[in-house]
């Protein structure tokens, strides 16, 4: 029943046959977050990842909890397998994420030490991971979600232990570890919350004025058919690009049920989802080329999306339905790229 509403019309996807991927329609990278377990266990998932996308962001396995489980232990096994997958299939690997307040291992949460000890811990984490993936990861989300919605700095464990200067230090340590990697600041709601966007921009500009190199901003864009307005998205792209930051639409999904109501699927709603994606892409196309880092979807099929688990609600936020059939937003993407 749902598949009927979700599916593209056959003639619409005929342009995209088995050997052609989404990225072949685009002048900038088209990415997906990869759920490593799905990649290794689900051949359909894997073949779509290979065929359709040319940029990969690890959804979880590069986060400190997985990659740095003990003070002196780095677990490279899965991350290395993903890096080889990217190399073998000619995919860009976007590293996500080094400094965040979530998905930290217990030993970091329990760590006792002076601000200097914490700074050293952060340095070792950033530099060990970045050095390990030198020439394999071309860009990194160095700091993730450091701001509150009111534009103040989030009181994360890093801010508590090191002070407000932790962001500057994280970027400096990163640059030292891999001078050729692109360094990003990544956050959510930047497209809908002007106060937050302005704070992030003035904070990063201030760091730049002090000589810290920051290459780009990841706008996550966990958005919905209810908000934001396409003009807000356009204004956000404009504002960031005019201040000389690359823009990565870094975690795109479009919820069709953000309020978690009893869900009534309709063709109209999935067309609305497609139209919002279409206008986002048309606006992204307007950004000067040197600032287009790419558009990354936060998953492949609705069934793999974090949203269902996290919010415990029925939702269909991605390009493919639960049976891996392309949805109207997929067709719209091909038309607008
Ligand atoms: O998609 C990720 C999910 O599998 C994890 O359980 C979750 C843990 O908080 O993190 C999700 O990814 C997040 C990303 O790393 C940062 N921005 C928000 C994403 C969705 O929560």
Image (cartoon, helix red, strand yellow):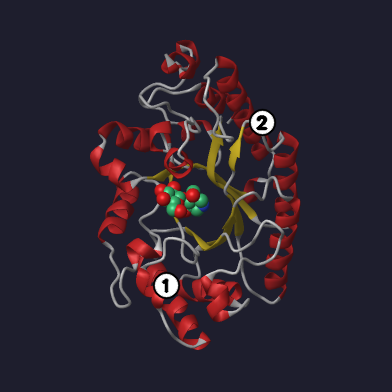
Q: Any mark on residue 109, and which?
A: 1
Decide which of tag 1 and tag 2 comes sooner along the chain.
1
Distance of label 1 from label 2 (alpha carbons): 42 Å
Residue 201 in the figure: left or right of residue 31? right
Q: Can residue 81 be seen in this view?
A: yes
Residue 72 in the image, given as x and y percentages of width and height: 30, 78
Residue 288 in the image, given as x and y percentages of width and height: 68, 46
Whether label 2 lies within 8 Å of ligand 1 gets the answer no
Q: Is residue 57 visible?
A: no
For label 2, the residue is 279
Could you tell me which residue is drawn at 41 percent across and 78 percent down? 124
Mark 1 lies on a secondary structure that is: helix
Residue 37 in the figure: left or right of residue 320? left
Callout in the foreground (1, 2): 1
Residue 281 in the image, given as x and y percentages of width and height: 62, 34
Instruction: Judge whether 84 appears above or below 253 on screen.
Output: below
Q: Any mark on residue 12, and which?
A: none
Which quadrant is home to the C terminus?
top right
Residue 219 in the figure: left or right of residue 238? left
Mark 2 lies on a secondary structure that is: helix
For residue 333, which quarter of the picture?
top right
């Amino acid at each position: 029943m749902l598949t009927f509403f979700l599916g593209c019309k056959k003639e619409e996807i005929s342009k995209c046959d088995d050997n052609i991927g989404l990225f072949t329609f685009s002048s900038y990278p088209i990415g997906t977050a990869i759920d490593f377990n799905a990649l290794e266990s689900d051949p359909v998932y894997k073949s779509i990842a290979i065929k359709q996308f040319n940029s990969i962001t690890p959804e979880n396995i590069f986060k400190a909890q997985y990659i740095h489980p003990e003070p002196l232990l780095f677990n490279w096994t899965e991350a290395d397998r993903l890096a080889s997958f990217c190399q073998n299939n000619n995919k860009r690997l976007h590293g996500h994420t080094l400094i965040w307040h979530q998905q930290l291992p217990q030993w970091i949460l329990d760590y006792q030490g002076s601000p200097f000890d914490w700074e050293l811990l952060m340095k070792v984490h950033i530099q060990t991971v970045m050095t390990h993936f030198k020439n394999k990861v071309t860009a990194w989300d160095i700091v993730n979600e450091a701001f509150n919605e009111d534009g103040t700095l989030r009181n994360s464990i890093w801010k508590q232990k090191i002070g407000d200067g932790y962001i500057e230090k994280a970027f400096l340590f990163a640059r030292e570890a891999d001078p050729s990697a692109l360094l990003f600041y990544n956050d959510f709601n930047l497209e809908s919350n002007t106060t937050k966007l302005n704070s992030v921009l003035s904070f990063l500009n201030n760091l730049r004025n002090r000589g810290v190199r920051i290459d780009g901003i990841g706008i996550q864009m966990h958005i919905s058919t209810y908000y934001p307005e396409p003009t807000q998205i356009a204004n956000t792209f404009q504002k960031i690009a005019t201040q000389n930051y690359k823009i990565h639409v870094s975690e795109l999904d479009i919820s069709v049920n953000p309020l978690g109501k009893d869900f009534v699927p309709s063709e109209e709603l999935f067309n609305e989802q497609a139209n919002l994606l279409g206008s986002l892409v048309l606006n992204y196309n307007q950004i000067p080329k040197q600032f287009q880092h790419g558009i990354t979807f936060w998953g492949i099929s609705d069934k793999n999306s974090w949203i269902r688990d996290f919010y415990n609600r029925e939702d269909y936020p991605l390009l493919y339905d639960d049976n891996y059939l392309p949805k109207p937003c997929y067709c719209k993407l091909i038309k607008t790229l």
